[in-house]
Amino acid sequence: MSRDASKLVAAASGPWEVVIGLEVHAQVTSAAKLFSGAATAFGAAPNAQVSLVDAAMPGMLPVINRVCVEQAVKTGLGLAAEINRVSVFDRKNYFYPDLPAGYQISQYKQPIVGKGRLLIDLADGTTREVGITRLHLEQDAGKSLHDQHPRHSYVDLNRAGVALMEIVSEPDMRSAEEAGAYLRKLRAILRYLGTCDGNMEEGSLRADVNVSVRRPGEGYGTRCEIKNVNSIRFVQQAIDYEAKRQIALIEDGGSVKQQTRLFDSRTGSTREMRSKEEAHDYRYFPDPDLLPLELSEAFISGLSASLPELPDAKKARFMRELALNAYDASVLVAEKETADYFEALAQGRDAKVAANWLTGDLFGHLNRLGKGIADSPVSAARLGELLDLLTAGSISGRAAKDVLAEMVDSGQSAKAIVETKGLTQVSDSDAIEGLIDEVIAGNADKVGQYRAGKEPLLGWFVGQVMKASRGKANPALANELLRKKLAS
Amino acid sequence: MNLPASISEARARLADRTLSANELVRAELKAMAAARPLNAFITETPEIALAMAGESDRRLARGEARALEGIPLAIKDLFCTKGVLTTAASHILDGFQPTYESTVTRKLWEAGAILLGKTNLDEFAMGSSNESSHYGPVKSPWRRAGDNRPLTPGGSSGGSAAAVAAGLALGATGTDTGGSIRQPAAVSGVVGLKPTYGRCSRWGIVAFASSLDQAGPFARNVRDAAVLLRSMAGFDPQDSTSADRPVPDYELACERPARGIKVGVPGEYRVAGMPPEIEALWQRGCDWLKAAGAEVVEVSLPHTKYALPAYYIVAPAEASSNLARYDGVRYGLRVPGEDIQQMYEKTRAAGFGCEVRRRVLIGTYVLSAGYYDAYYVKAQKLRRLIKQDFQAAFGRVDAILTPTTPGPAFALGEKADDPIAMYLNDVFTVTANLAGLPGISVPAGLSADGLPLGLQLLGPAFAEETILTLAAELERAASFTARPEPWWRLP
C-alpha cells in the first residue's frame, strides 16, 4: 500500500516508509462495569467503586452488562464493521496486584466486531481509508500506585472491571499525521455515537502504537509496540521518534528487535519495556463462567436504526445541501458539538457566511479563551442575531467583528451592544454624501491623481469615509457614491 | 431424645409439635460434639444453629413453617457463608469470613433450614478421599468387619457424607465436579445427587472447575434428597450458566411408578478388573428395576474410556485459572517476600497443599502456548464426543444405570501416594460432569467386608425427576438399612 512520495522519510541510504497500526482502548460509556454492577464514574475515592466480583472474592461470578454490549455493537456499526452473531469471552491469565482474579476477561479468537473501515480526513482536504481489523470487549485492570509510600505500593480497584473496547486498525497509516487524523476521526465517531467520551486526559482513550519501517514496495519490517500513549500529540511524537530510531538502527547496520516500548512524554522518546522473549504466555482459554455471547438479528437491526448521523454522512450532506467545500465541511463535523452549533446557526441563513463566522471569528475567540464550543459564551442563537443584523445591512462587517468581541467578553446580545454603542450602520445617502464631500475637499491632491487615472485610490477614499463615520457608514453605499462624486 | 431418621420424619414431628427445632438442633449438636474423632466438621456453628432454631420454632408456633423449617443441615465448607469462616479446607483461605452468602445456602435458609456447621473436604474439592484437606482427613463412620483401620469417607465432599451417615445432620450440601457428591455418598452409604449443570447456582461457591462444578444434596433417603434439591435449585441471574427454567416438585417424582421407563446399561462401564461384587450389585440393580416394570437394555457410550483423561485436563486447566486469585493480596494467607513476585511464590507455596499444587501445575501446562491444542483443545473435543454419546443413548433410553464406584471405601493412606489410582475412583462419575448431566447414587448393598456400595443413575439434562423415580425404586428394592457402629463415641 505504498503511497505518494511526500510520506516517505529521507535518509542517507535512500527513502524509508513508516508503517503504523493502532490499538485503541476506548472506555465504554456505561454507568456500570462490564461484568459487575459497580459504578464507573471518574474521580471517585480509591476503592469506592469495587464490587465483590471486581475484587475477585471467592465464588463470585461475572454477568455481562447489556449496555456495554450495545455500545460495542453501535461502535462496530459506526465503523461499518461486521457484527459477529456469536462471540466468546476468554481469560487472559497473568499475575499482578491490580488484576484481582489473576486473569482479565477479554475476547481473543472470536471478537464481537470484525472487519470494518474508517475514513481519515487529512489537512489538504483529502480523505483516506484505514482498515479496522476488529473490535473486542474486555475488562480494564485496576491502578497500582507506587509513589504513595517509600516501601509499599497501593492498589485502587475503581477501574478494575470497567468495560473497554479494544479497536485494532490494520497497519494502513504511513505518517504521524495520518495516525493523528485516525485518532481524531475515531474519537469523533465514538463521541457522535455516545459510546466513549474520548477523554484522553482521564484515560478514556489510550493507544498502543505499532511502528515499523521498510523500503517502499518491500514487505513489512519488524515492529515495535509503544504501549499506552494517552494523547494524540504524544502518539505523533512517539511515531516520529520511533521511526527515526528504527531507521538509524538499520542505517548503522543493525536490525530492529520486536519489543514493547514505553513513551516518555518529558523527553519525547521511547525506551524498551520488554522484548519478545520476555513476553507473557497468557494461557488464553474460553471463560467457563460465561456462555458465548449470541446476538439476534433484531438486536443488531434495532441498534442500527438508532444510530445518529455520523461525521462522514454529515460532511457529505453539508457539501451537497449547503454547498460547503470539503475543508469547511470537515472542520464543522470534526466535533459533534461544532456540527450541532453550525446547524443551528445556519438554519435560515447563508451557510457559507455562518461557516466563516463560526470557524473563523468565533473559533478565534474560543482559542483565545481556551474554551471549547460547548462552553462558548455566545450561543448559536446569539451569533445568529448578529449575522441577521449584518445581512440586513444594519451594521457593517467591520462593526460586526467588534460586536462579536464585545459579545464574547460581556455576554450581552448583539442588538444591545449595537444600540448602546450607536453602531447602527449609516445607509442614509445624504449623511454619507456629506462625509464624502468633506474627504474630497480635504484631499485635493489625491482627487487629482484619481482623476488622472490612478483608480486603485478608490479603496483609500472608502477607508477615509469609513473612518470619518467611525465605521458606521455602509461601505457598499459609500463605494457607490464615491465613484459618482469622483467621476463628476 | 430419639432423633428422627429422615427429613420427612422430622418435618412431620416438627409440624405436629412432638419435636421442637431447638430440641432437634441440640440433639444434633450433641451428636456432632461426640463425633469429633470423625473430623467431619471444620467449623461448628452452635450459636447460629440455636438462633435459627429459635426462629423456626416461632414460625412453627405461628403455623408459618416453610419447606425446610427447622431442618438442621451440614454445609460443605466450599459454600461461602456470611460471617462464618469459609476455608475450602485450604491453608490459603486462613481466617476468610465472607461478607456474603452463597445462593444455594441462602435459598436453604430462606426455606427454614438450619446451619449446624461447615464440613471438611479435600482442599478446594480436589480429591476423592478427603486426604488433601489442610484440616486433616475425615474418618469414615464405617469400618471393615473385624478391622479398626480408619477408612476414607470418599471425597471431595467427605465431611458432608460422613455427617449424614453418622447421623450428625439430617442432610448436607456437597459439590460434584467429577464425582465429589456421588462417590462419597456411595462409599458412606447415603444418597447423593448431582443435578444437571446449571440447575443450582454456583454463585458463592468457591470455584474448582467452573464448567463442571455443580452443587447438590446428601440425604439419608431418596425422598429427602428430592426435598433438599427443590429448595437448592433455581435460576440465579448472578450466575450466567444457571438455567432459567422452573423447579419441579421433585418429591412427587419419588412416588411415580418405574413401570415402562427404559433404562440403559452401558457395556463400556464393565471395566477390566471390576470386582465381582460390584458386577453382581449392578446385575441386582438391573433385576430390581426390571421387577418394577422398567425395561433394561444395553446401550453404548463408546468414548467412555477418554472421559478420565479429558477430565484431568479440563478440570486442572480451569482450576489453575480459578485459583490465581489466591495471591495473598486481598484476603487469606499472606507470606511476606522481598518483592511482589516473591510474596506470590511464598504465599502460594505455603498456602496450597501438594494435590492442589499438582493440579495447578498440570492446568498451567495444558494451557501453555504450544501445548494448548494438544491438550486443552483435544480434551474439549473429547468432551463433545462424550456428550454426543449420551445424546445418542438418551435417544433410546430414559436413564442409565451403572455402579457409582469401582469398589468400596479404601483405607486412609492406601492410595495417597498414587494419584492415578486415586483418580480412577472417579471413572464412573466424571462422564456426567463432562456432559453436564444429572446423576444420583443410592446405597444398594454391602461389600464382602461390610462396607456400603452404591448404584448410580444418570439421566438426560434436567431429567432429575426420572432418575429420582428410579432411585426411589432401587431404594425400596435394596432396602438398605445398614448403619455404621458408632465407634467414635467415647465411652
Image (cartoon, coloured by chain):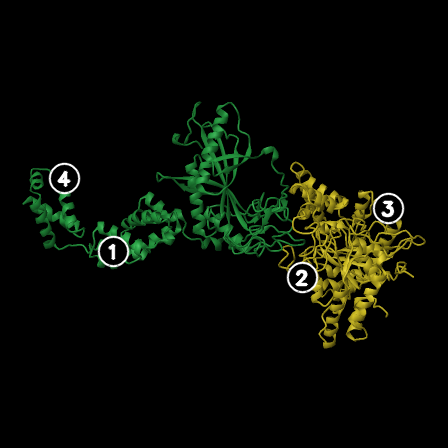
Chain colours: A green, B yellow
What amino acid is found at the position of numbered circle 1 in the picture? Asp
Tell me the element at label 4. loop
Locate residue B214, reporting x and y percent.
Answer: 71, 55
Dot in front, 2 or 3: 3
Residue B18 sits above or below residue A415 on the image = below
Locate residue A82, reporting x and y percent.
Answer: 50, 46
Question: Where the C terminus of chain B falls, by quadrant?
Answer: bottom right
The 10 Å Cα crowd at callout 2, few under 14, some 14 to 19, many 20 or more, is many
Chain under label 3?
Answer: B
Dot in front, 4 or 2: 4
Q: Residue at x 53, y 29 (%)?
A: A256
Give me the C-alpha separation between circle 2 and circle 3: 40 Å
Checking the image for residue B414, the label placed there is 3
Locate residue A485, reporting x and y percent.
Answer: 7, 47
Reading the image, the residue beneath label 2 is B234
Judged left or right of residue A42, residue B448 is: right
Reading the image, the residue beneath label 4 is A456
The 10 Å Cα crowd at callout 1, few under 14, some 14 to 19, many 20 or more, is some
Residues tagged 1 and 3 counted as in contact (Cβ below 8 A)? no
Judged left or right of residue A158, residue B190 is: right
Depth check, front residue: B466 or A109: A109
